[in-house]
Structure formats: structure tokens, C-alpha cells
Image (spheres, rainbow, N blue to C red):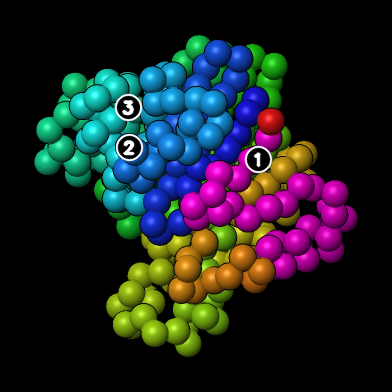
Amino acid sequence: MIIYTLFSGSSGNCVYVKDKNTEILIDAGKSAGAIEKSLAALNSSLYGIKAIFLTHEHTDHTAGLEIISKKHHVPIHITHPSYKALSSLTYLPSCARRHDIRYEVAVGSLKIRSFEIPHDSNQNVGYVIENEDGEKLGIATDIGHLTEEILSSLTGCNYAIIESNHDTGMVKSGPYPLFLKQRILSDRGHLCNEECARLALHLAKSGVKAIALAHLSRENNTPDKAFSAIKRALDDGGFSKIDLKVASPVISTCICK
């Protein structure tokens, strides 16, 4: 399995996964042109993408959908509540494959299964992607709080892309208005570094090989703070050999190849 985060953060999110001749995207939160440029650097193209799986309807996960739907007619898998929230898009209906919250789809050599994640959207899901050799990638971002469903869904993944959005102290002392601070820190907001460390340790205990920290806030976190918090938890737990990296907001970051 080949895995890259093309973009990560509040300015846009997109994950590229390739296995044998099957290529998919998780989210399309940048312009179609930007996504195409990133794919070209990996010797790929939107013309080769077999399907796009959306986590939820927020713009930083869907910005490229309209043009991609119009020009490339890629099947777009989306939950019913998120589809309803994007009803203003003209070309999405012709490509949309609407699903209940928990669904499973086979695309080429990959099986993709969704699970529910609490967030302040109409609906948010994470994904576990498995190939025919049993390799598993787990993706979970925009997490208001950790749930048993998230933990159990990600158990046994070989690779994981998980949210390490903010440092709680930076949020509380930062310039954001009170209502926005409350939203971020709520149980339907985003995951802090400490809770991400707890999730990373859970993954480590179930055999994860590599973890990418994703969706870092530009204003309320730093790559060093996120990396240090999670690295410290892994080291203290006896898992210092796990490949840990921070996903770049604008440069493709390799998780596995």
C-alpha cells in the first residue's frame, strides 16, 4: 500500500492511497488544480482516481469536489447527512454514492469501511482501508472526543493518520474569540495533543507501524509541540521504534510506500 497525505490542516485535507492498480482519495479539500499538481508529483492524476471518500461536508474537506465532479466524474462516496449539506453543488449529484453512517465498499483491491466520529458537522466519519494482503490504514480526524467506536475501529491498523489539532494551553491563551475557543475544546470540536497521544498509544499496543499527525491548527499548535507530546507517550510506553511524523499542510507527506 502506498499512502500520502497531499494536504493536511484547516486550509485543506486530502489523502492519497494506492494499492496495485487501485487509487483512491480520502477527501478533496483543495482546488482540483492543486490536487492534480500534487498527484502529478507522485506520477498520478485525477484521471487515475477510482473513487473519493468524504469524511464530512466542511469546506476544508470538500473544496475541490465541484470541479472534480464536473471534469472527472469520479464516484464520490458520502453519507446522506453530508450530501444534504452540499445540496448547492451542481455536479455532485451525478457522482455521489450516498450511504448510511456505517458502510463498506470495495474498490479494486481495496475494502473501505466507515465509522462514526463526533464533530460539529452534519455527519463525520473515519475510514479503515484494507488491501488483499490484510494491510490496514486507519484515518480519523476532526475528532471532538475519543469514543469506543473510534478506538475499536482503528485497532489492528498497520498505518494511521490521526488528528493532533491543538495544544489546549495555546487555545485558552490565544487570540480566538470565546465562542470559537469553546467550539474547538468541546466534545464536538477537535482533538488536542494529549488525547491524540492516548490514541497513538492505543494504536501502538495493537501493532501500528507508522503514525502521521494530521489536521494541526496553524494558530493553536506547532509541529514540535504535537510531535513531542505524542513521541513522549510512545517512548514512555516502550514504542520508540514506531515511525512518527507530522503531516505537512502543503507538501505531500509519505506515510508508507
Q: Earlier in the sequence, mark 3 or mark 2?
A: 2
79 up-or-down from 147: above or below: above
* Mark closer to the observer (3, 2): 2
Classify mark 1: helix, strand or loop. Answer: strand
Start and end of the magenta stretch? 227-256
> Which residue is found at the position 83% from the left and 60% from the top?
235
Image quadrant holding the N terminus, namely top right
Classify mark 2: helix, strand or loop. Answer: helix
- What is the crowding at mark 3: few (fewer than 14 residues within 10 Å), some, or many (at least 20)? many
Would you say the residues marked 1 and 3 are in contact, meaning their CB atoms lie under 8 Å apart?
Answer: no
Q: Amino acid at mark 2?
A: Ala
Q: Earlier in the sequence, mark 1 or mark 3?
A: 3
* Mark closer to the observer (1, 2): 2
Choose between 51 and 157: the one closer to the eye. 51
Q: Which residue is mark 2?
A: 32
Residue 201 is left or right of residue 237, and the answer is: left
Q: Residue furthest bottom?
A: 173
Would you say the residues marked 3 and 2 are in contact, meaning their CB atoms lie under 8 Å apart?
Answer: no
What is the x, y in percent for residue 128? 55, 32
Disc 1 to disc 3, C-alpha distance: 23 Å
